[in-house]
Image (cartoon, rainbow, N blue to C red):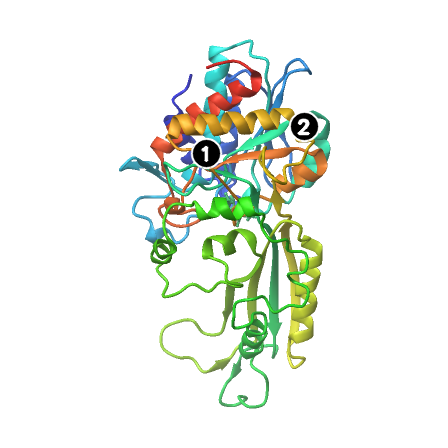
Amino acid sequence: MFDPIEAVKEYIRFPSISTDPAYKAGMEGARNHIAGILQRMGCEVEIVPAGLHPLVFAQRKGDPSWPHVIIYGHYDVQPADPIEKWDTPPFEPVVKDGKLFARGAADNKGPQMVHVAAAARLLEKHPNIPLRLSFLIEGEEEIGSPSFPDILKRLRDRLNGDFILLSDNMSPNAEQIAITCGFRGIVCINAEVTGPKSDLHSGIHGGALLNPIQALVDLCASLHTPDGRVNIPGFYDAVIPPVDWERAEVAKLPGTTEDYRQFLDIPAFHTIDGLTPQEATRFMPTLEFNGIGSGYQGTGTKTVIPSKAILKISCRLVANQDTTIIEELVIKTLEERCSKKVSLNIQREHCGSPYRVVPPGRSDTPTDQNKHLVAAFQAADKAITEVYGKPPLYTREGGSVPIISDLKKVTGMDSLMIGMFTPDSNLHAPNENLDLAMFLKGIDMSERILAGVAGVSV
Ligand code: BES
Ligand code: ZN
């Protein structure tokens, strides 16, 4: 059995930034690293070509009557920017105060290794265990999984599993584990407002034309009401209120709302409909501005009317909302509301559907839930309670992992998602980190879940 912490460290040393073509070698290194581990575990490994970054598909085959678990992870990471804000270099793993600091430590190299290491250990102890395993380790998650629907078609026949097991989600803290029962969907849209064909002197021409910055901020200001709602007719039409058990689980989250405010370091919350911030991030959709740019940003002043202004928007969607409907609504609204004294160019970016799974034994649990998924949920509840000392919470998350809903739509498989990073893991930010105690206990937990599904004891 390999040393899981060393395996994560080595994985991290490959800078696998999927969005930046300069990191092609890092992508390849990370891909080969995880493929090598899976191969040494005895899996048949295939590198599946994709538009940009191939996917690693590995299988431990077996009798068709055995349960078949699909383990998902992604080997790509976010860019390390702003590099100067890191305390240690982002691609040199450093352990400090029980945490492993590096880009990708939490999202997703560490958490995926929990399940890879657990499977490796279980296969060593029980070489003949009646369990089929497939590993789907993707290289395009952080850029919206553009090739995944196509890959899914090609792998469809081999993805005849019972459920998906993954940890690309969050727990409230390293002792209180969450089983995530849903992700929000996402719709990304970029917009560019163009005024004059080139930048202009604001003294010579100011007063004659609409400044693209003004046109863009007027447009932005029209998209929310003062009480925080998205001001687009129809935006909330498909939203279904949370079920009682879901609100009760959220109410059990550790820490007060005031703790959360201090964590965010903001003067006040801005939520809608009397929801707590913890509910709003899980149960409601949003329209967020992720980037805005135009004009002179340097030191001092520059009297210019810029030619262009750009905007990046993403909407988070909740269960039952449709990405195409929301994308069309937002684009139509932008087009209608933008001043006709400038021109507006809209770019559709990536989308991903929301996902929700109901654990066994709830008021709205589907009656036809896969029996191995039910066994896995039960084994997970027991293992988490024993290993971490507290039962898990069952909450939805605000983030998005679009392929989980794609997999559900195409294969019918649901996902068991166990949070292996925490709010202070600094995902996508400087000083990203993984709690190593949580990680090591996670391997124990995952081993018990897999054993539970296979019907053997560890
Ligand atoms: N691991 C995250 C998703 C996540 C974050 C789940 C926080 C739960 C809590 C994932 O790698 C991610 O960052 N996804 C992107 C979506 C993608 C389409 C760029 C996201 O949520 O922004
Ligand atoms: Zn991410």
Residue 375, horizontal then vertical, whole percent:
57, 24
**Is residue 448 something one can see in this rendering?**
yes
At label 2, which amino acid type do we have? Answer: Leu
Tell me the residue that label 2 is attached to.
159
> Quick one: 66 or 56, which is closer to the camera?
66
At label 1, which amino acid type do we have? Answer: Pro
**Is residue 19 something one can see in this rendering?**
no
Residue at image location 33% in from the left, 49% down from the top: 86
> Quick one: 37 or 118, which is closer to the camera?
118
User: Counting other residues with Cα less than 10 Å from the Cα at mark 2, is it few (<14), some (14-19), or many (20 or more)?
Assistant: many
Residue 19, horizontal then vertical, whole percent:
53, 47
Residue at image location 45% in from the left, 34% down from the top: 111
Up the image or down, 262 lies above or below 166; here it is: below
To which quarter of the image does residue 284 belong?
Answer: bottom right
Viewport quadrant of the N terminus: top left
To which quarter of the image does residue 129 belong?
Answer: top right
Residue 184, horizontal then vertical, whole percent:
57, 49
Q: Earlier in the sequence, mark 2 or mark 1?
A: 1
| Most distant residue in the top direction | 128
Up the image or down, 211 lies above or below 347; here it is: below
> Quick one: 236 or 192, which is closer to the camera?
236
